[in-house]
Amino acid sequence: MEKEIISFFEKLKDTVMKTGFSVQISQEGKVLSVGDGIVKVSGLRDAKLYELIELESGDKGIVFDLDAESIGVVLLTEKNGIKAGDGAYKTEQIVSVPAGEVLLGRVLDALGNPLDGGPKSEHSPYYPVEREAPSLLQRDFITQPLYTGIKLIDAMLPIGRGQRELVIGDPSIGKTAVAVDTIINQKSSDVISIYVAIGQNISHILKIIEEIQKYGDFSKTVFVVADASNSLGLQYIAPYSATAIAEYFLDKGRDVLIVYDDLSKHAEAYRSLSLLLKRPPGREAFPGDIFFIHSRLLERSAKLNQHSGGGSITALPIVETQQGRISSYIPTNLISITDGQIYLDTLLFNKGIRPAIDVGKSVSRIGGKAQVEAMKKVAERLKIDYSRFAEVEVFTKFGAHLEDETAKLIRRGERMREVLKQPRFHPFTLSAMVLSFVILNQAYSMLLILLRREPPV
Amino acid sequence: MKILHRTLSAHAELVNKIDQEGRLTDKDIEMLINSITAVEI
């Protein structure tokens, strides 16, 4: 009997030890003031940076500023009329979003709540929106290509799985089109796509959803949407939430493509929040840490080594320029963070050249290593020849006498331009691209029939 | 586009070799050109 009692208490002790009880003290603070998208809260002394705070009204926010007397909270929701004097409670949680296979084919808000009328994903693992980027030891070299299906990009500006390639250009000249066509091309690959809309208007987002439903594989795509009517907090957090969802697949060893559309609006949302929180403004009124918020986001895109699962996140951040000024603050920041840029040019767009990519100003710093032998063989000199052609093309405008060599280059450039033109929603397979370039390089007479032009040199 | 499709569908094995393995030899290129010329001109 005594033995049984002892064994019972030992079992009980084991169970209690394994359960790991802990005492949680939740502090209560008070809302001091309410601003546009932010609140100041006092009394939450132990609040941590980026901790989720719940307000008496039921709204939620993230800790953004820690002062000696008060904390600045960025609101994620502000539907219930927050008042000064309301209670504010610590949750001891960093903001996290649901992740998992069930999210594929879904349209979500920046907190992972469904926007498509479907059920909320229950029993999904939660991933923190802020996570450290993979370490040096976890990473691998970029060796596998990610095909966009766009001839010009895959031949001259190849993108590898795990690369960050910026898409940059003025408004309405096809930046989103390049990204969406790349998502559509993943229909025939094993890559999962995530599209993040930041500060876009709803009709624009709806159009993109429809395009992917019609031409791509919607069941392999996740939409994370923070439209222009959402709070600044949601717009700020959206790319981090989407990256957290991507990290779930990365941890499973999958390859993910993530499109951030666009980081100019993300920077503007962060600028507004920072100014409301009275942080000192810097160049173009952006706060001092604007570079860091984008670099820490984009560093989470990486190719992992086999030991760490072998997955990858490829990022296509989009950034908008005004009147072609790529030297303004946010574009230059992003150019230096990413592994290359695809620059879209208004003049090319107005000439009817699609995609309106300026090859001379575009570069892919690491993608070349991921290019397959077949493509390298046929597209080796393409970029140099095309850039040289773009430089000398201007001479043809005022009838200058051209040397034979230049005339030859211009004729080849014109042929190249025609071959590289590509309508939307017509992704090329690798073999079709290779064959196009074989024709361009070696079967001139064939190309004449294709292009109906005068005899080549 | 028609020529591309016709040529590619006539060389399923080569298409597979390019798409799956990413390989292309000089001999393959020659064969492709001959095939285009034979079909179209």
Image: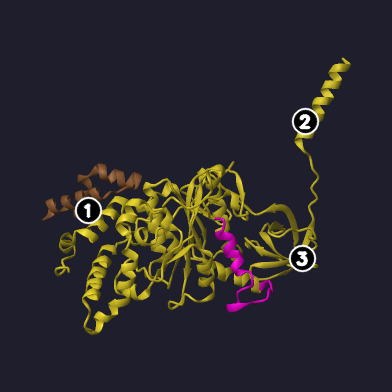
* Marks 1 and 2 on same chain: no
Q: Which chain is brown?
A: B
Q: Colour of chain A?
A: yellow
Q: Which numbered disc covers residue A191?
A: none
What residue range appears in magenta?
Answer: A276-300
Q: Residues within 10 Å of mark 1 (few under 14, many from 20)?
A: some
Q: Amino acid at mark 2?
A: Thr
Horizontal and vertical percent position of residue B29: 23, 51
Residue position marked by numbered label 2 in the rendering: A15
Q: Is residue A134 visible?
A: no
Eyeballing the image, is A348 above or below B1?
Answer: below
Chain under numbered label 3 = A
Residues at discs 1 and 2 in contact (Cβ within 8 Å): no
Left or right of A223 in this view: A52: right
Eyeballing the image, is A374 above or below A457?
Answer: above
Question: Looking at the figure, which quarter contains the N terminus of chain A?
Answer: top right
Q: Amino acid at mark 1?
A: Leu
Eyeballing the image, is A305 above or below A281?
Answer: above
Horizontal and vertical percent position of residue B34: 16, 51
A49 or A167, which is in the foreground?
A167
Residue position marked by numbered label 3 in the rendering: A85
Toward the top, the furthest residue is: A1
* Image point (34%, 67%), residue name: A384
Q: Nearer the viewer, mark 1 or mark 2?
A: 1
